[in-house]
Image (spheres, rainbow, N blue to C red):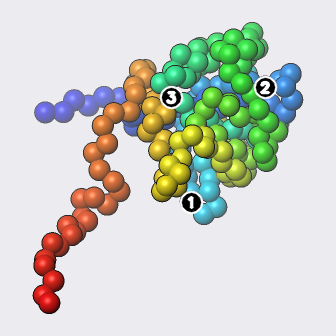
């Protein structure tokens, strides 16, 4: 049996990311965002949706740049804290002892402690209601070299213990269930060759 609820956003879990912005160290800020995702592969594009009253909103609107920093179990406290405190009142990098470093192709800083930093340039701002969507092109991605297997080149993000947000709560990702396409992959045949 199902219950009908009023229309709402129950697409969970979602990545809990820290969005960094600002053109100079004096205005660098962090914003916790769960309304984010991929919208296109070629060109690579993503989005973040932000309420206009948030401090970072005006910074991103003016500079046209931001960085999506993936978060981990070690960054969970900072992720939550940066979502409930305003950059108008706090220097979030300093308060959470996070290290800002200039992006390679954007002025906005990356978070050095994050395993993946996705540098973005805004292409369009879509007013949607409670939030405006910043549609952006991905111009550069930085990844933690310690998570790259030197033998295979595989990026093992799971070793960083990424976290997700689900209906007001944070969760660490758990057990892997399979690789993309595993449900239809043919099993290898173990026939003996005839000689």
Of labels 1 and 3, the one closer to you: 3
Residue 91 occupies which quadrant of the picture?
A: top right
Closer to the camera, 22 or 173? 173
User: From what the image shows, is residue 71 above or below residue 168?
Assistant: below
Q: Secondary structure at mark 3?
A: loop
Residue at the spot of label 3: 72
Closer to the camera, 95 or 55? 95
Closer to the camera, 28 or 168? 28
Q: Which numbered disc, 3 or 2, marks the residue that appears first in the sequence?
A: 2
Within 10 Å of the Cα at label 1, are there few (<14), some (14-19), or many (20+) other Cα atoms? few
Q: Is residue 153 among what the camera can see?
A: yes
Residue shown at 60% from the left, 40% from the top: 144
Residue 179 occupies which quadrant of the picture?
A: bottom left
Within 10 Å of the Cα at label 3, are there few (<14), some (14-19), or many (20+) other Cα atoms? many
Residue at the spot of label 1: 41
Image quadrant in which the C terminus is located: bottom left
User: From what the image shows, is residue 141 above or below residue 51?
Assistant: below
Q: Position of residue 133 (x, y in %)?
A: 63, 40
Residue at the spot of label 2: 28
User: From what the image shows, is residue 112 above or below residue 143?
Assistant: above
- Residues marked 1 and 2 touching at CB (< 8 Å): no
- Left or right placement of residue 86 versus residue 181 in this view: right
Q: Position of residue 79 (x, y in %)?
A: 56, 22
């Amino acid at each position: 049996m199902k219950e009908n609820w009023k229309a709402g956003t129950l697409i969970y879990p979602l990545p809990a990311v820290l969005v960094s912005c600002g053109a100079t160290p004096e205005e660098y800020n962090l914003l916790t965002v769960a309304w984010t995702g991929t919208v296109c592969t070629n060109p690579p594009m993503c989005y973040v949706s932000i309420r206009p009253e948030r401090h970072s909103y005006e910074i991103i609107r003016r500079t046209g740049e931001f960085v999506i920093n993936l978060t981990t179990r070690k960054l969970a406290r900072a992720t939550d804290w940066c979502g409930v405190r305003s950059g108008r009142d706090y220097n979030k990098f300093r308060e959470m002892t996070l290290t800002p470093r200039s992006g390679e192709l954007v002025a906005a800083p990356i978070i050095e402690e994050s395993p993946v930093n996705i540098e973005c340039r805004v292409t369009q701002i879509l007013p949607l209601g409670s939030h405006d969507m910043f549609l952006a092109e991905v111009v550069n991605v930085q990844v933690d070299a310690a998570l790259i297997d030197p033998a295979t080149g595989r990026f093992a993000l799971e070793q960083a213990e990424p976290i997700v947000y689900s209906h007001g709560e944070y969760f660490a990702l758990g057990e892997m269930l399979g690789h993309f396409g595993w449900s239809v992959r043919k099993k290898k045949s173990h026939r003996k060759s005839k000689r």
